[in-house]
Amino acid sequence: MKWLMDFLKKMDKTKWMILGLGGILLLVIALPVNDTGVKEDEVFSESLEENEQEESVKDYEKKLAAKLEEALASMDGAGKVRVMITFQDSGKAVVEKDLTKSGTELNSSQYQEASVYEETDGRQPFISQQKLPSIEGVLVIAQGAGNSAVKKDILESVMALFPIEAHKIKIVKMQSES
């Protein structure tokens, strides 16, 4: 015990700083990584305001339906067309990640992911990709849908534009205006 006291008395300021920094470094290394099973991009996408997300999906739905209506209405025999599109989900924002590898041995390597942030108006995750909502079904109401050839052309056109099966596309004749 006496040798320890003598050693501590002989240490100067620089050695104390090195010893303190080494201790802090050991604490940081020894701290366990707390993995709650929830990824940061999931937390981010959940923290988006629901109204904002719903509005952007509705805008996308309206634009997509308008483009489809315009295309189908220009088909020979289709006449006036109305379109309704439903979605499976509201899309997904893919957050850019930094992947860090620690450890030198093959068995003790650990990978750690951290979101990349951009500093524009506050600290927001950097979105590397925005995945569009998946289409669930399409309803087409057309004046010319009573004609089987026109109905077939509409069905094939919708299937060519969207990755959905024929049974998820419904084409009906528009009621005549009185």
Image: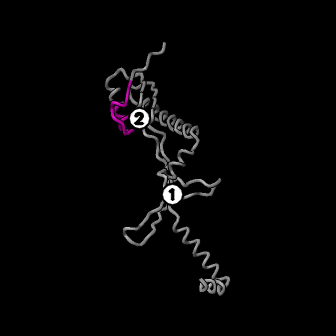
In this orientation, which residue lies closer to the viewer: 119 or 105? 105
Horizontal and vertical percent position of residue 72? 42, 31
In this orientation, which residue lies closer to the viewer: 21 or 79? 21
Q: Is residue 165 magenta?
A: yes
Residue 166 occupies quadrant: top left
Q: What crowding class fits label 1: few (fewer than 14 Cα within 10 Å), some (14-19), or many (20 or more)?
A: few
- Which residues are drawn in magenta? 155-171
- Identify the residue shown where x is 54% and y is 71%: 26
The amino acid type found where label 1 is placed reads: Asn
Horizontal and vertical percent position of residue 17? 64, 78
- Identify the residue shown where x is 64% and y is 54%: 122
Horizontal and vertical percent position of residue 163? 37, 39
The residues bearing labels 2 and 1 have C-alpha atoms spaced at a distance of: 38 Å
Q: Residue furthest right?
A: 13
The amino acid type found where label 2 is placed reads: Glu
Location of mark 2 (residue): 136
In this orientation, which residue lies closer to the viewer: 35 or 127? 35
Residue 153 occupies quadrant: top left
Q: Residue furthest top?
A: 178
- Identify the residue shown where x is 44% and y is 29%: 73
Location of mark 1 (residue): 34
How many callouts does the rendering have? 2
Sequence-wise first label, 2 or 1: 1
Camera-side mark, 2 or 1: 1
